[in-house]
Image: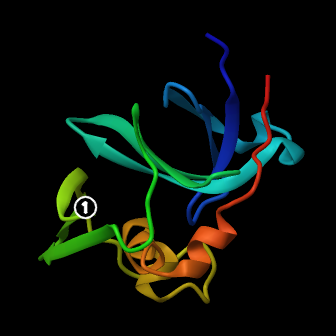
Amino acid sequence: MSTQKVAISQFDGTSKVLKIDVGSGVGEIFSSDEIPEDDISFGLFDIYEVNEKSNFIALLATGDGPLLFFNEIKYRPELGKTKVSIKDDNQTSHFLILHEGSPVFGLFYERKFGIGLHPYNRERDDIDFYYWLKTKVINPKFYEVYTKKYTVIE
């Protein structure tokens, strides 16, 4: 089976790049200086911890529209069918992606507060990838913006 690997940038970060196999969803995180800037595709990822193991959630723009990866799970959001729920409880937030009301993927993460990568990033959707995604999947423009070809590497 042929593999198509792409690299995408970290949400609210510049030090890490995710190299992911589009077919399998298997990914590996690298330092951003290991991948040339011209090889970075349009997309974002965030890292979360489960039992002291790093995992990722990634969004990639493809010719068929946005594609989400949750480690090896792949999901293509659809306007009007995809919803994101976030429930906050003290320092923890519960993120859940639903397709027509049925759960696709969920996780608990430590709530993000404060200032983001840039001092002007002070709003939650500037520093919290999950909250940002919640606001985007309900917007038709999101599907236009994330419909473009990606750059295959290796």
Q: Is residue 115 in sight in this rendering? A: no
> Taking 111 as reference, is 147 left or right?
right
Question: What residue type is disc 1 on?
Answer: Leu
Describe the element under mark 1 as helix, strand or loop: strand
Q: Quadrant of the C terminus?
A: top right
Q: Residue 149, image x and y in percent?
A: 77, 49
> Taking 61 as reference, is 46 left or right?
left
Decide which of 142, 116 is in the foreground and name it: 142
**Identity of the residue drawn at 16% across and 74% down:** 87
Q: Residue 116, image x and y in percent?
A: 53, 76
Mark 1 sits on what residue? 98
Decide which of 71, 136 is in the foreground and name it: 136
Q: Quadrant of the N terminus?
A: top right
**Identity of the residue drawn at 26% across and 35% down:** 52
Outermost residue toward the top in this view: 1
Decide which of 74, 108 is in the foreground and name it: 74
Decide which of 3, 129 is in the foreground and name it: 3
Give above or below for 111 relative to 147. Answer: below
**Identity of the residue drawn at 61% across and 89% down:** 120
